[in-house]
Amino acid sequence: MNLQSIKNWFGNVDISHTDWRLRWPVMLLPFLLLGMLYFLFKSNQLNARYTQDTIQLQQVLQENLLSTDTATDAVNPAQALLKFRSQFGKLEDNARTLQQWLQQGRNTKVQAQQAGALVELTANYRNGSDALPNVSFWNEISVLLADLENAVIRGIINTPEARDMIESMRGQYAQLRSTNFVTPPINESGELAANSQERQQAQLETMSVGFSQLRDHRAAISSAQNKALVLAALSSALFGLLLWGMWRASKNRVSATAGRTRSEQGAILKLLDEISPLAQGDLRVRATVSEASTGAVADAFNFAVDELRRLVLAVTESADLVKKSVSETRESAHHLARASSVQSREIHRSSNYLNVMSDTMAQLSAHAVESSGIADLSVQQARAGNVSVKANVDGLLRIREQAEMTSRMMQRLVETSGLINERVSDIQAVAKRTDLLALNTTIRSAAQASNGRNEGVSQLGYDVAYLADTLGRASRDIASLSDLIQQDATITLASMAKTVTEVDDNQRTAKQASENLNEIDRVSNQLNSHISDIASKSLRQAGVVKQLSANMGVINNITRDSTLELQNSAKALEALQEMTSELRESVSDFKLPRETKPTRVSKKVARSSVTHA
Amino acid sequence: MKTDEYILFSAGDLMLCAVASAVHCIHDSLTTQKEAGTHSWFEGIAVVDGRLLPITDLGAYYGRNATSGRVLEVAHNLGIAGLRVDDIMGVSNEYDENVHQLIDVAQLVQSPKFLDIQS
């Protein structure tokens, strides 16, 4: 319960329009009720204390009575102990019976547990030693009995059987407790009488004090109950006064509002007649604003109709603009979806190209590695070639030296041949002279023979001629051989000169080749490093291209998702267009005046649609 | 039986032969002294063993090419003359008439044309 609920409750009473005289009983009534409750609670407390004191006084009285009865039983302690145990068994039986009753009750579970604890205590003692119980044992039993008695007082235990049983158990407890007090040890029986008289005197004094306390409690309870009764009477009187005032106030209010209700009903009927065309969607209606209570309603209605008119116009224009924008946006979404599909295909194709490029880069890297090996082999071969060229240069140098030596020897041969030719010339001259001599001799011999003499001269002439002829042939052969030797030697010299020239050329070429091989070595090393660099970069590039291909795949997935989203957006835009048509259709039933200016909302919508476009 | 010896030689493009007895001897490397007012076929005068010997170019004399070889000294009983020829092939006891043309040296050196050296 909060403040609002209290106000609502008072609102039901409707004391706001009643006279102020009806308010003070309402304000005073809670205080009176609180005072009455306070005195009832106090009297209840005093009553409990009164009951407790009564019980204690009753115990004291029973102890006094038992002390006089047990004085004679003390002569036989064994019989007294047997009787004591028998009484304890009765207490246990009663407690067990009470526990069973309380367990059957709906709100007496706690008291059943207390009765069970009482059963347990008594059973433990009865099954234990023969000694008498101590003071703490008695206090525990007394506390459990007091709790059960409080439950009886609070009304938790309300059955008469249980109440009688608890009262009987209290009596048994008092009897057993007094037995305990008056049972003396066997060897101290002589002092029993004196102690009993002193205890009885003390119990009498206690009883006197208890009775005086009972009287005081009783007086206080009576006072509190009287005060509570007075406050209850006052509260009843105030409540009656409040009901009477409320009845009077409601009666006056009903009579005052009856006339006003009739005039307002007429104004309401007129207003209903004026605004009834609105039910068919006619927004051209206007309500008459008068002095009656419906004037404000009519004014508000006219304002509402104006706003509704603007709203319908704005809805119509907005629906048209939204339909147009949605149509354009849907076309754009279709275009985007198609472009996204093309983009997806292109990305897929690019991804394939990238894969091919990656493979090509890997092959290029492998080729570069192979080329590096080839370049290494080229370097080795260039070095071997350089060594071979140097060996060739040395060989050419040796050939040149031998050729020069051969040239010198051939030169000498030519010179020698010249000398031979000179000698051959001499021989030829001799041969010529011999030939001439032979001819002349032959002519002489012929002349002499013609004269018939000197046959031996003729033979000599023939011999000389033969000699000259032989010599001439030999000299011609030698000359021809010498010429041949000279020609061969000249040719050989020319050849050797040419050989030397070619050897020089070859030597220069070999040196150039050696330099070129050195250059090839250097270039091959450089090429090897470049190829290794290309191989490593190609490998890295292949990895980058592969990663790029993977990224292209991710982009392709995103693009495909975007395409699906765009297609979904196009479908959603179609649905929105249909909804816009439905919205336009829904406001088409409204009838508007002929001249209606565009509203601020429609301008804003139009501006926003232009910015979107 | 007496057989003639023939000396075979060439002059210009002519292949000639003559009786060996008509030739006194053969000279080689004679130096001639050209005489003015003589025919072109008259080569000049040469000194041979202290004697003057007129030399005639036999090829030019026959109207053929000039000769440049040895000189045949005509037997003294036939006349005093030297015949410049190109090559002397030798002395033989026979000749081929189809190849060599036999000349009469005595008739040659005694002919007025041969003796008239003045041009």
Image (cartoon, rainbow, N blue to C red):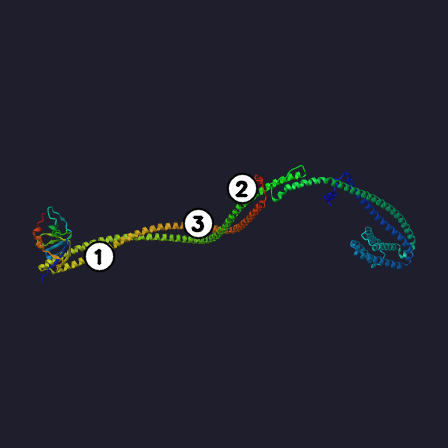
Residue A343 coordinates in the image, percent (x, y): 50, 49
**Quarter of the figure with the N terminus of chain A:** top right
Question: Are labels 2 and 1 on one chain?
Answer: yes
Residue at 26%, 54% (x, y): give it. Answer: A488
Going by the numbered disc 2, the residue's amino acid type is Val
Which is more N-terminal, label 3 or label 1? 1
Rate crowding at label 3 as few (under 14), some (14 to 19) or many (20 or more) other CA atoms within 10 Å: few
Q: Is residue A404 among the parts visible in the rendering? A: no
Front-lying residue, A24 or A48: A24
Q: How many marks?
A: 3
Q: Is residue B61 left or right of residue A328?
A: left
Label annotation for residue A610: 2
The residue identified by callout 1 is A477
3D distance between C-alphas at marks 1 and 3:
69 Å
Going by the numbered disc 1, the residue's amino acid type is Asp
For numbered disc 2, what is the local secondary structure? helix
Labels 1 & 3 near each other (Cβ < 8 A) = no
Label annotation for residue A526: 3
3D distance between C-alphas at marks 2 and 3:
67 Å
For numbered disc 3, what is the local secondary structure? helix
Which is more N-terminal, label 1 or label 2? 1
Labels 2 & 3 near each other (Cβ < 8 A) = no
Residue at 42%, 49% (x, y): give it. Answer: A523
Residue A51 coordinates in the image, percent (x, y): 85, 50
Residue at 20%, 53% (x, y): give it. Answer: A426
Going by the numbered disc 3, the residue's amino acid type is Gln
